[in-house]
Amino acid sequence: MHGLLLRGIPFPILAAVAVLWISAAVGLVESGGDWIAYTDRGDSNPFTEILLFSLMFADLVNAALGLAIQFHQRWARSTVIGLCIFRSATTLIAAIAGETSPYLPIAINLTLIVLMLFPSSAAWCDR
């Protein structure tokens, strides 16, 4: 049965959707945990609240993009490419400022860009 569900879906699409869904799930667990820990502290800061909410929203965007790609949406492919370029740039800026380690997020973003640039990905999303 599983072979029938996956038949005809190009590997780059399968891989990209898997990366988007996994990153969304891991991100929601992580940022949701951060949100819970932050709200339990009691010393709220509006900037931190907006930042934590934005992280959760970004994870939901990943899930929505994965779903849209599964449904052949052309706009989702170009959105993934644009968002990954933007996210790589902001991660690099944060790394230069000493805020974060850039290797994993940039690797994930570049992988998604490459997967979306395959001709089979373009053909899938142009249906």
Image (cartoon, rainbow, N blue to C red):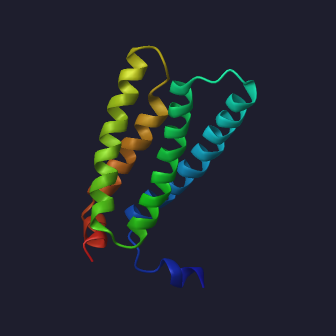
> The C terminus appears in which quarter of the rendering?
bottom left
Check the picture and name the quadrant holding the N terminus. bottom right
Residue at image position (40%, 79%) is 8
- Residue 75, placed above or below residue 71: above
Q: Which of the 4 quarters of the picture holds residue 95? A: top left
Q: Residue at x 68, y 29 (%)?
A: 38
Looking at the image, which is closer to me, 26 or 119? 26
Vertical arrangement, residue 7 with respect to residue 82, above or below: below
Q: Position of residue 103 (x, y in %)?
A: 46, 30
Q: Can you give x and y, in whole percent of width and height, for residue 51 in the image?
A: 51, 31
Residue 12, given in percent of the width and then of the height, sits at: 38, 61
Left or right side of 115 for 34: right
Q: Residue at x 28, y 46 (%)?
A: 82
Residue 11 at what x, y percent from top left?
A: 41, 65
* Quarter where residue 73 is shown: bottom left
Q: How many marks?
A: 0
Identify the residue at horizontal 65%, vertical 45% (top origin): 29
In the image, residue 88 above or below residue 64: above
State left or right for residue 126 relative to residue 7. left
In front: 9, or 46?
A: 46
